[in-house]
Image: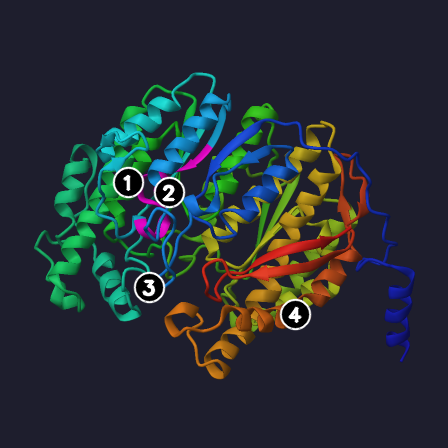
Amino acid sequence: MRRLLAILLALCLGLTACGTAVPEPQTLPEGENSGPEVSYIPLDDRPVNADRVEYLAESLGYRLSMPEEDLYRTRLDGQGTNPNGTPYGDRAALYDWLREQEEAGCDRYVLSLDQLLSGGLVNSRSFLGEDVTLRDGTVLSEAEFLGAILDLLSGEENEVYLLDTVMRLAPTVGYEGWELAGYEALRSYGMAARPALAGDKLTLENILSAYPLGADGEVLDPADFGVTQEAVDRYLLCRARKLRLVSEALTLTEGMENIHFLLGVDDSAPTDSIQTNELAYLRQAVEGRGAVLSGADEDGMLALCRMYAQCDCEGELPAVAVRYFGGSESRASSDYDHQPMTEIVAAHLSYLGCEMAEDGEVQLLVLTAPADESQRKTAVRDCVAALRDARKAGTPTILMDAAKNGYGTDFQRELVRKTELGFLLGYAGFYDLANATGIALANGVARWLCLQNGAPRTQGQADAFRLTLADSLVKDICYKNQAKIQTTAYVRDTLRGDPDNFCRTETDPEAVLAQAEICLRDAAGDVLANLSRSAMLTDSEGTLAGFGTLRIGKVSFPWLRVFEIRMEWEGS
């Protein structure tokens, strides 16, 4: 009874999880952002590539310009077509939009080559390519089209970040007729080791020649992997096309110091595979002009953070103290990545320009899967304690849950009960571990830089940062662990539909949305209450203000599947 009364008293007094009074939210001047305009062509229309980049840009004072959504939208099987008559992005229209931005005087760009050259990530995995017909009737080969894009952006006044991906090991289930069994068979073919190339033998043509071969140099038999020769032939042609195009982009931009590359490694494997030679080749080719990083969806955020650091903060980045909990950081991070967590984190920090140091200005806490099952409770307890200590000391902190549900919901429950989530600079835990690294670090480092540079900020910037954090927390804790599971069961068991594509079973999206809203609002209650009782850092001196109150508004499923959800936000 005494404990219950203490909890009720704390709530009545408006105390934070650390036992101190919640300060009032900060009030900043209203007004539009006056920072530089950044033209952004995303990988596709999923929230991680669109909404989250918009929030981050707004929080930094940037004015982010994007094409109309139908120009870069992806539609899965049965979901119709875009205005260009295809289920993928409109390459010619995107080029026109880019030209208009350049003519209007824009000089900062973050551009997905997967979108510009292939109509998006999903289509890039299975696209054999075709000529591009511009709106004036000019027909360009893909090589000529790439050259036209790069010529358009070649002005020395421009700062250009080009994003591309290393093609993953198999195409997308639910696109162009691919089913799970076919995906798994082709993935197993892609996972087979190829002849290792190094030194002078690591050339584009040698890599392509090695595609059909096993590590022993003998031709792989597709039947051994349960896949047809026809499927393999198309797969290898698609891989070759993508690798040739990014190689050509790197060659054409040699010597252009204002053009930077970020190449994401789409789903991979912890063993040698068809990607291994590609990765070695691209890392060598991009050296000094960018990086090859595990992950893909979050690269728009990473590029934006690096642009802000280099162009607006004079490259003054924090040293980062990295602490791991759980003991699995040196193992392969997942079945879909080729590096352990320590290497992934180090590579991402290096790309952003941050050094690692024991006494860094920013702390990154990473929870990994438990290496020893007997230490599960200890890992959770220690990580939560570190977060509470950081709050008491005022240490700027980024949190990454890389445990892949290795603790069930124990960690999330303790996180919500015992810490102040609004104090975090960044958080992620939904996607694969590489994705979580990029999301957490891009948001967290960008927020630290924004607080450090001392430039006047608007209320819109502060509100946008709150959305970057709240969106990650609610999706990664509440939607992933509860509402998504409940909604998936509702679609399958009650509506007898397909949660991975409502159109495939003619399932009414509105019926799914109605249920998803109920589940999400219920699941998010504790997290949103925690945020409303949290303090947040507002400057480089450690000044605190209340996080404020946020509510979930309208929700939608951008790809008409349960996997990702888009949330609109309301609050003060």
Alpha carbon separation for disc pair 4 and 1: 44 Å
> Do the residues under discs 3 and 4 have CB atoms within 8 angstroms?
no
Residue 375 visible within the image: no
Name which of mark 1 and mark 3 comes first in the sequence. 3
Q: Amino acid at mark 1?
A: Ala
Give me the disc on residue 523.
4
Alpha carbon separation for disc pair 2 and 3: 19 Å
Q: Amino acid at mark 3?
A: Val
* Residue pointed to by mark 3: 173
Alpha carbon separation for disc pair 3 and 4: 29 Å
Work out which residue is located at the far left of the displayed protein and give it: 218
> Which one is in front in this view, the residue at disc 4 or the one at disc 2?
2
Name which of mark 3 and mark 4 comes first in the sequence. 3
Q: Amino acid at mark 4?
A: Ala
* Residue pointed to by mark 2: 115
Q: Considering only vertical position in the picture, is 177 above or below 89? A: below
> Residue 542's x, y, as percent?
78, 39
Quadrant (top left/top right/bottom left/bottom right) for the N terminus: bottom right
Residue 114 falls within the magenta-colored stretch: yes
